[in-house]
Amino acid sequence: MHLWEYILLFGSVFLGGSTGFLFPKERKGLLQIVLSFSGAYILGIAVLHLMPWAFGSGDSQAGLFVLLGFFVQLLLEQLSAGVEHGHIHAPHHLSAGFVFSVMFGLCVHAFVEGIPLSYYGGMHEVQHGGHTHTQNHLLYGIILHHIPAAFALVFLLIISKLRRIWIWACLFLFAAMSPFGAWLASLYVLPETVQVKIIAFVIGSLLHISTVILFEMDSTSHHYISWKKLLAISAGLGIAILTIL
């Protein structure tokens, strides 16, 4: 990764989360629209780019690691209280254990997602015969996914009555985890077999997050999707499809 990519990855998530301080009330409708767009985009990227490379690598364990990533993300969301999906459920009594649980689940998820960014550009170049004009789509997908998650995290901690200095610290830590994962992975030359397994694991995580976002309906009593959410999903998938053209 280039320096500007690290700055963009950290800065966009940090600034996006900072907007949580500007809203005295939850903007659930807008948050769901943004999440729908990002969920559709990362689903498209996972299916159109990541899965073909992982399963076309010849690694017989790729499917196993996709399932593993899916299951581990399910476990992590038990700790993070679903903040990745924009869920904001403040506890009745704030405790250090609650904050640690949420941050641990979010940070592990963000760290793992950042690892393949260190070699994704090279992998994409080989896969597409040197054409690299769209190699940053995974970076953009992670950014689009983490911005609403950061917003939800800040709003959750605000309504949980956590001191503002600690909220800033939590936001900084979350925004830094994906860049840290990418930087740490860049220090080592990972064997291709390891790269495939990491990508497969991330695919499972992204599939879980994107499908949960997309399957959450706007009504609790009917299977109904608003036209705004449908447009956001269509836009996300459409942009993902453009990356293969």
Image: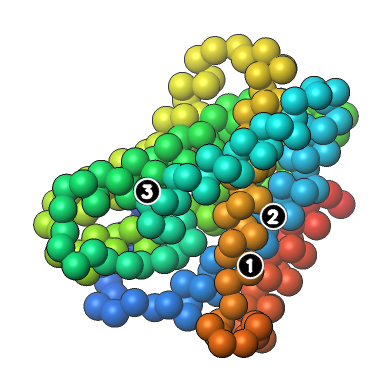
Q: Is residue 237 left or right of residue 32?
A: right
Q: Which mark is residue 214?
A: 1
Q: Is residue 29 above or below residue 103?
A: below
Q: Which mark is residue 79?
A: 3
Whether residues under marks 1 and 2 lie with C-beta atoms below 8 angstroms apart, the answer is yes
Q: Which mark is residue 226?
A: none
Q: Position of residue 134 (x, y in %)?
A: 74, 44
Point out the tag, 1 or 2, that comes first from the N-terminus.
2
- Crowd band around label 3 with a 10 angstrom C-alpha radius: few (<14), some (14–19), many (20+): some
Q: Is residue 54 above or below residue 172?
A: above
- Crowd band around label 1 with a 10 angstrom C-alpha radius: few (<14), some (14–19), many (20+): many
Q: Position of residue 217 (x, y in %)?
A: 59, 78
Q: Is residue 145 above or below residue 54?
A: below
Point out the tag, 2 or 3, that comes first from the N-terminus.
2
- Helix or strand or loop: what does disc 2 sit on? helix
**Rounded to the nearest whole Å, what is the CA distance between mark 1 and mark 3?**
21 Å
Residue at which label 2 appears? 43
What residue is at 62 percent from the left and 57 percent from the top?
210
In front: mark 1 or mark 2?
1
Residue kind at label 1, given as amino acid type: Leu
